[in-house]
Image: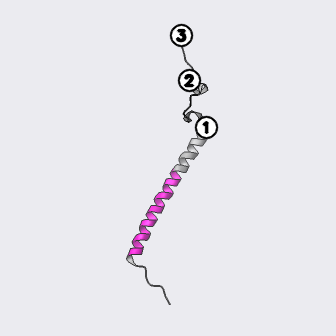
Amino acid sequence: MSFRPDHELHQRRFSRNLGLGLTLVAFVVLVFALTVVKVTRGDPMQAFDHTVRPELQPAATGGTQP
């Protein structure tokens, strides 16, 4: 008993699924690479929590205080 050859529809579906799978893998690799770069840069990431933090504000130069 042998297997019947694949139908043409199954070959097209496999091709589309393979293309979609490779696209998703590329997206995951891109997000992972961006995450690694952001973490290894060492920039302070505290400023993105939507609250005012005086220690992160640049020092005011010149000017008068009332």
Task: Of the two numbered discs 3 and 1 on the same chain, state the one appearing first in sequence.
Answer: 1
Hey, what amino acid is under mark 1?
Gly
Spatial CA span between label 2 and label 3: 16 Å
Q: Residue at x 53, y 46 (%)?
A: 34
Whether tag 2 and tag 3 are in contact, CB under 8 A, the answer is: no
Residue 47 drawn above or below residue 10: above
Question: Which residue has dot 1 on it?
Answer: 42
Hey, what amino acid is under mark 3?
Thr
Badge 1 density bin: few <14, some 14–19, many ≥20, Cα 10 Å:
few
Residue 54 drawn above or below residue 23: above
Question: Which residue has dot 2 on it?
Answer: 58
Question: At numbered mark 2, what does the secondary structure look like: helix, strand or loop?
Answer: loop
Q: Is residue 12 left or right of residue 45?
A: left
Hey, what amino acid is under mark 2?
Pro
Q: Nearer the viewer, mark 2 or mark 3?
A: 3
What secondary structure characterizes most of the magenta part? helix
Q: Residue at x 48, y 62 (%)?
A: 21
Residue 3 drawn above or below residue 66: below
Q: Residue at x 46, y 65 (%)?
A: 18
* Residue 35 drawn at (x, y percent): 56, 46
* Residue 17 drawn at (x, y percent): 45, 66
Question: At numbered mark 3, what does the secondary structure look like: helix, strand or loop?
Answer: loop
User: Is residue 20 within the magenta segment?
Assistant: yes
Q: Residue at x 55, y 35 (%)?
A: 48
Task: Of the two numbered discs 2 and 3 on the same chain, state the one appearing first in sequence.
Answer: 2
Question: Which residue has dot 3 on it?
Answer: 64
Residue range highlighted in magenta: 9-30
